[in-house]
Image (spheres, rainbow, N blue to C red):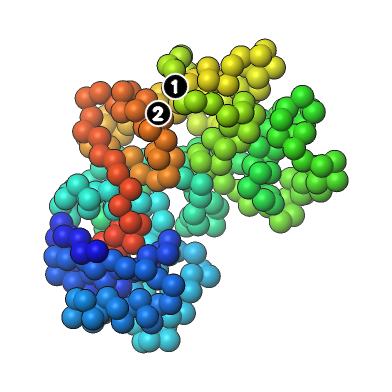
C-alpha cells in the first residue's frame, strides 16, 4: 500500500503492530513486518529508498531497537499514543506545523513514565506532544480478565459474588490477585480507558449497543466513580443496554469537557479521536454529538504511519 504524506520526510523506516512502513519524500510504502529484514527488503524494492532513520516504540524491549543497532541506523523512539494521534492527522492531510487536541484511547501501551497509557488527552503536533490529562492510574496485575477485579478494588467495591466478574474467577485465583494488588508485587499502573470499558462490560454483560441516556456523574478523571455507579445500577437490576448507554454518555461528556478546557487554554479547535476504543460506532457517535463546534477527525490508519511521521519530524 502506498500512502501520500502531508509533508516531505527523510527516508525513515517504522515498525509497529505487525506492520512496517518506509517513508521517503512525500510517500510511504506500507507492508507486513513478520521479519524486519524481509519487510525492509520488500519495501525498498517497491520504493527504491534506503532508510536513514528507524522509528521504534518507546518500550525498551522493542525488537526494532536491536535491529536498528545491528544495522548501524539511528533509532528514534515514539510514544504509541502520540503516534496514534499523528496517524489520524496524516490521514486527514494536516500539515507539519498544525496542532490538535488528541484523545488516544485504547487498551494500553508503554508510556514515558513506565506506566501503561491508554486514556490520554494530548495537545499534539507531529514533532511533539503534551499530556494535558489522563484517566487516574489503576493498579493492575495478571491477565486481561483481572481488569474488572482490579477496577473494583480501586473503586473500593468488595469482591462480592453477586458481581459477574467476581464469580468468573476461582477462589484461589481471587486470593492470589488480592495479594498482588495489596502488595504491588507483579503489578503495573494503567490509565487505559479500553481496560476500564472492558471491566464495566464484564459487570453489566452483553448489550446491543443502542439507546441514549444521561451520563453517570464523575469527579474529575477517577475511573472509580464510574465503576461504583455501574455496580449500583447492576445491583438495582438496571438493564445492560441502559448501563452501556450511560457509560457511552459519560465518556462523551468527559471528552467534551476536556476538549473545551484545551480550547480555552490553548485556542485549539481540531479534535482527533484515535485508538481502538473508537472502533465502537455507538461510542464514537456519542462523542461526536458532544463535540459540536469542534472539527472532529477520526479513522484507524496504520499506527506505523504515525510512528514514521513523529520520528521524521524529530
Lower position in the chain sequence, tag 1 or tag 2: 1
* 65 vs 134: above or below: below
Name the residue tied to disc 1: 210
Which of the pair 252/27 is nearer the observer?
Answer: 27
**Residue 129: horizontal and vertical position, in percent?**
33, 51
* 291 vs 87: above or below: above
**Residue 189: horizontal and vertical position, in percent?**
60, 48
**Residue 150: horizontal and vertical position, in percent?**
68, 40
Q: Is there a contact, CB below 8 Å, between mark 1 and mark 2? A: yes
Mark 1 Cα-neighbour bin, 10 Å: few <14, some 14–19, many ≥20: few
Q: Does residue 18 appear to the left or right of 2 in the view shown? A: right
Mark 2 Cα-neighbour bin, 10 Å: few <14, some 14–19, many ≥20: some
Which of the pair 129/305 is nearer the observer?
Answer: 305
Name the residue tied to disc 2: 282
Q: Which mark is residue 128?
A: none
Which of the pair 226/136 is nearer the observer?
Answer: 226
Q: Residue at x 80, y 46 (%)?
A: 173
Q: Residue at x 23, y 29 (%)?
A: 294
Q: Which quadrant of the rendered structure holds the C terminus?
A: bottom left
Tell me if I can see residue 298 in this picture: yes
Amino acid at each position: 500500500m502506498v500512502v501520500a504524506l502531508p509533508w516531505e520526510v527523510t527516508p525513515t523506516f517504522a515498525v509497529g503492530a505487525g506492520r512496517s512502513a518506509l517513508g521517503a519524500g512525500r510517500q510511504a510504502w506500507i507492508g507486513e513486518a513478520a521479519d524486519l529484514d524481509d519487510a525492509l527488503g520488500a519495501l525498498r524494492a517497491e520504493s527504491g529508498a534506503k532508510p536513514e532513520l528507524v522509528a521504534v516504540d518507546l518500550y525498551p524491549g522493542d525488537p526494532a531497537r536491536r535491529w536498528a543497532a545491528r544495522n548501524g541506523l539511528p533509532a528514534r523512539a515514539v510514544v504509541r499514543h502520540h503516534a496514534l494521534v499523528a496517524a489520524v492527522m496524516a490521514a486527514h492531510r494536516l500539515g507539519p506545523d498544525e496542532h490538535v487536541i488528541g484523545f488516544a484511547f485504547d487498551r494500553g501501551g508503554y508510556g514515558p513514565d513506565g506506566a501503561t497509557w491508554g486514556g490520554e488527552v494530548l495537545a499534539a503536533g507531529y514533532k511533539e506532544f503534551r499530556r494535558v490529562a489522563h484517566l487516574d492510574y489503576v493498579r493492575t496485575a495478571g491477565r486481561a480478565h483481572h481488569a474488572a477485579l482490579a477496577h473494583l478494588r480501586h473503586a473500593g467495591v468488595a469482591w462480592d459474588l453477586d458481581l459477574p466478574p467476581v464469580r468468573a474467577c476461582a477462589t484461589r485465583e481471587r486470593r492470589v490477585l488480592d495479594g498482588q494488588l495489596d502488595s504491588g508485587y507483579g503489578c503495573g499502573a494503567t490509565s487505559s480507558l479500553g481496560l476500564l470499558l472492558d471491566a464495566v462490560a464484564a459487570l453489566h454483560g452483553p448489550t446491543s449497543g443502542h439507546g441514549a441516556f444521561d451520563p453517570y456523574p464523575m469527579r474529575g478523571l477517577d475511573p472509580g466513580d464510574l465503576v461504583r455507579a455501574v455496580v449500583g445500577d447492576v445491583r438495582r437490576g438496571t438493564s445492560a443496554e441502559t448501563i452501556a448507554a450511560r457509560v457511552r454518555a459519560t465518556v462523551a461528556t468527559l471528552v467534551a469537557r476536556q476538549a473545551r478546557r484545551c480550547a480555552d487554554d490553548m485556542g485549539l479547535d481540531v479534535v482527533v479521536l484515535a485508538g481502538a476504543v473508537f472502533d465502537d460506532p455507538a461510542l464514537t457517535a456519542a462523542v461526536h454529538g458532544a463535540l459540536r463546534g469542534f472539527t472532529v477527525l477520526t479513522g484507524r490508519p496504520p499506527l506505523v504511519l504515525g510512528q514514521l511521521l513523529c520520528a521524521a519530524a524529530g
